[in-house]
Image (spheres, rainbow, N blue to C red):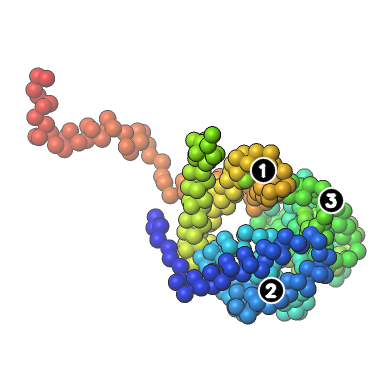
Amino acid sequence: MAWDFCNDPAFEPELEWTRQFVHQEIEPLDLVKPQMSRESFKLASAPLKEAVKKRGLWAGHLDPELGGQGLGQVKLALLHEILGRTQSAPEIFGNQAPDSGNGELLAIGANDEQKDRWLWPLLAGELTSAFSLTEPHSAGSDPTQITTSARLDGDEYVIDGHKWFASGARDADFVLAMVVTEPDGSPYERASMFVIERGTPGMEVVRNVHTMDHPYAGTGDQHVRGHAEIRFTERAVSRTLHGKVLADKQFVQDFIAESATEIQAARLLTLQAAWHWDTFGSSASRVEIAQVKYWCAGVLYRVIDRAIQVHGALGYSSDLPLEYMYRIARNFRISDGADEVHKSFIARRLVKNYEPVAGWPSEHIPTRRSAAEARFSEYLDLASENL
């Protein structure tokens, strides 16, 4: 396979501007964000969003007709590598989750009236959204197992079910929920996406599920969108979507070498997948995408774990950001599909490129040697000599 990929040199000034902007403007803001109300943070971040828009980097994941920049996957990957340094950068650049993905879904599935009501305000940063797929009693990595249902009753839908880990649902203006509408359909054709507005009768946001990301209430809660548990009962109107310095110790040197190599491998794997997407399209790049998902999530977790080990008790404390990074990193081996699901998919797709053979494997040495002896028999001088 080809490993070649390249980036447009003309985009490097934008990446350098982003590096400086994140370091000088957004990182300081994040240090005092827990001391701000939501409204104060909105006011403080507004001029930063305007600067991003003026620079032409707002919503780089979206096509121009949706108000974005149409950067493609390689440029977007390089941009996100910088934005990932701080929590608020994705929001300030207009591509935070789950709003970014929800916007793309609405762009595909919503009609003009629905786009006017939810998509354009969402892309402008005027509304926030949530994504609700996972259920407590079924494997979230397999969407075909969801049981929350919607049935048509007159000109409205009645939705019944139980969801959790609904990203951002506690404070979202609307929830994009996947529910079963065709129970007798094929596994991949049973479900539909519904837009359910905040305050809709029968939608009960029970609680935010406490995780390693945010295990208890405390300062800064006002900015934590979290992952909510939701119950749907009654009627919902259809809206059909971490001596010698440690660095001289061999075990620390091993940590450093392992981490540096894994990070570089993750970067190259991601950029190669982005190049493959840009070149051959998303459907033809599913193996490359799955490889990135499980490999990079594992690298993130292992690098942070080594950093905590080197820093000891300080690394485990909240005086450093490592413990927070460790808690949230564990989620990434689950949230976008379990590692095992991605590995199984990769193996199944790759195996399809090979056909089984009857008898011995094609590289069976005795069989190949017999064929070679027959082919080159006249040159086998030692075969008849008494050695």
Q: Tell which of 330 and 144 is nearer to you.
A: 330
The tag on residue 48 is 2
Image x and y of residue 334, in percent: 66, 48
Q: Residues within 10 Å of mark 1 (few under 14, many from 20)?
A: many
Q: Amino acid at mark 3?
A: Ala
Find disc 3 in the rendering and name its residue. 217
Residue drawn where x is 51% and y is 62% of the image: 274
Image x and y of residue 307, in percent: 60, 44
Q: Is residue 172 left or right of residue 80?
A: right
Q: Amino acid at mark 1?
A: Gly
Q: Nearer the viewer, mark 3 or mark 1?
A: 1
The tag on residue 315 is 1
Q: Could you tell me which quadrant the C terminus lies in?
A: top left
Residue drawn where x is 76% and y is 62% of the image: 33
> N-terminal of the two: label 3 or label 1?
3
Q: Is residue 181 above or below residue 25?
A: above
Q: Is residue 174 above or below residue 68?
A: above
Residue drawn where x is 35% and y is 36% of the image: 361
Q: Residues within 10 Å of mark 2 (few under 14, many from 20)?
A: some
Q: Amino acid at mark 2?
A: Leu
